[in-house]
Amino acid sequence: MRKQSLVPSPPPSESSAKNHIRHGTRSFRNTSLALFAAGFATFSMIYCVQPLMPAFSREYGVAATSSALSLSLTTGILAFTMLLVGNWSDRLGRKPIMVWSLFMSAFLVLATGFAPNWDVFLLARALLGISISGLPAVAMTYLNEEVHADSIGIGMGLYISGSAVGGMSGRLVAGVLANYWGWHVAIVSIGVISLIAAVLFVRSLPDSLHFSPQHVSWNGRVQQIRMLFKDSGLPWLFAEGFFLMGIFVTFYNYLTYRLVTSPYDFSQAQVGLIFSVYGVGIFSSPVMGHIAGWVGRRKVLWMAFALVITGVLLSFAGAVWAIMLGTILLTFGFFGGHSIVSSWVGR
């Protein structure tokens, strides 16, 4: 059995890196386009249900907590499955797993739009959590293997940008379309867009040149995970990421319910447009990362948590401007904190 080290592999030497994808080449442009499209589709499919939760409650007669399962079921299963899919990609290859993940997920989203009842709807969203895990779990590995060390930062940045834009666009498109044609049309439209993105992905992404099949036993994978939790700092960073994401998703889930009821009475389109605030995250990550370079990651992480808590407290006020300002502060703090935690885990 080939052993795997938890220590990241060093950058390829000059001689071995000649055929790695580099910035400025056609292969790099194709790779960037493919991974941007993949990130866009992945996060559109995951989060398109968030502005539609009140509509699910009305149609299926479920409470807000049950309606929230349309998102939390997907993300919860996704978090677990991502720990397992690495083994499959080690044996079958990076691109085949990502292609399967995107196409299967797009078809599941299309099927979700025709769900005859709430149980079938949740089943489709649960299966989505399994199928979609292949993309985020493997994309970074593909970049590390195929892209030159000098260009990998740009490639990862474009993939993350696609994820952020997809998360925002999925919510916006679903909310606006649902206002005029109903949530079924909204979700089917997201499925069609994701299917187009999957076709673009498979046509653009270069085949792996540096992948070699390997077998790591499940016991070996468990041992790798256990080693991470023996570190004195990593479990705390995992917990911080968990709480940041939990607060962020829960806040937006219930914000939609609050704004569609009296005294606000927002339309479905207006609720969808609120998710444009998500765009704040595109700027907060590099800004807070830059500040962290001056004052240190620890201080900036506390700053991020302070912004998130302030945003939640401010949203308790009744005025719409206070709710919107609170949403902006929370979103800015979340994405900034997310980037700090992620980079800290890497170090």
Image: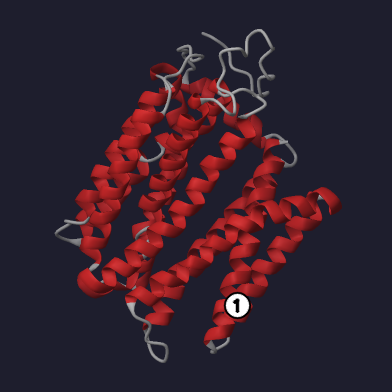
**Residue with the most extreme bottom position:** 263
Compared to 53, does 153 lie above or below?
A: above
Q: Which residue is drawn at 35% across and 74% down?
A: 269
Describe residue 36's horizontal placement relative to residue 56 as left or right: right
**Residue with the most extreme left position:** 116
Quadrant position of the C terminus in the picture:
top right
Compared to 127, does 138 lie above or below?
A: above
Compared to 313, does 124 lie above or below?
A: above
**Residue with the most extreme right position:** 295
Q: Residue at x 44, y 68 (%)?
A: 253
Q: Where is residue 121 in the image (x, y as percent from the top left)?
A: 23, 56
Q: Residue at x 58, y 87 (%)?
A: 317
**Quarter of the view holding residue 321:** bottom right
Q: Mark 1 points at which residue?
A: 325
Describe residue 187's horizontal placement relative to residue 296 as left or right: left
Residue 245 appears in the figure: yes
**Quarter of the view holding residue 279:** bottom right
State the SS at label 1.
helix
Residue 82 appears in the figure: no
Nearer-the-camera pick, 156 or 5: 156
The type of residue carrying mark 1 is: Leu
Q: Where is residue 185 in the image (x, y as percent from the top left)?
A: 21, 61
Nearer-the-camera pick, 74 or 256: 256
Q: Position of residue 44 (x, y in %)?
A: 39, 52
